[in-house]
Image (cartoon, rainbow, N blue to C red):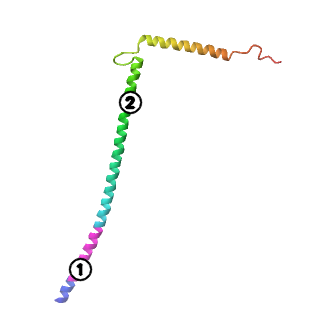
Amino acid sequence: MASSSRGQQRVEDVYEQQNDQRLDELHSKLRTLKGITTDMHTDVESQNLMIDSTNDRFASFGGQLSQASLRARQAFGIGPGAGTLRPWRIAMLIVALFITFWLAGKVFAWWWAPVPGGDMPA
């Protein structure tokens, strides 16, 4: 009976060693998994900060663009308060463009005018 209890003890010791080995393997895998999840959490937090920063920048840019648009509308008399572009401003713009093109034509005609007697062979 002593040999059977001794054999039984060996079998239990082998099972205990196998359980300890598997428990160590499981603990190692859990540490690896914990490291991975910690890295993922850190990366997600970093990306959230980047997204928040980008969102803040775009919101600021949108506000600045809105203000610039409002100032441009006020400068040109366009918008809900002004209705449309004022007719006298349109007329002044057309006259100014006409005078500018007329002067530019005169300057270019003077610049590229043929020189009298310049094409004759000597």
Dot placed on the residue nearer the N-terminal end, 2 or 1: 1
Q: Give the prevailing secondary structure in the magenta stretch.
A: helix
Q: What residue type is labelled 1?
A: Asp
Is residue 18 found left or right of 102 in the rendered image?
left
Q: Check disc 2 and report the residue beneath it.
A: 64
- Tell me residue 83's x, y (percent): 36, 15
**The magenta stretch spans residue 57:** no
Q: Residues within 10 Å of mark 1 (few under 14, many from 20)?
A: few
Query: Looking at the picture, how far across and down is residue 22, in whole percent?
Result: 27, 71
Label 2, secondary structure: give it.
helix
Q: Which amino acid does label 2 sit on?
A: Gln
The residue range painted magenta reads 9-26
| Residue 37, image x, y percentages | 31, 56
**Mark linked to residue 75:** none
- Residue annotated with mark 1: 13
The vertical placement of 78 against 63, above or below, is above
Secondary element at image label 1:
helix
Residue at x-position 30% and y-position 63%: 31
Name the front one of labels 2 and 1: 2
- Quarter of the view holding residue 72: top left
> Residue 105 appears in which quarter of the rendering?
top right
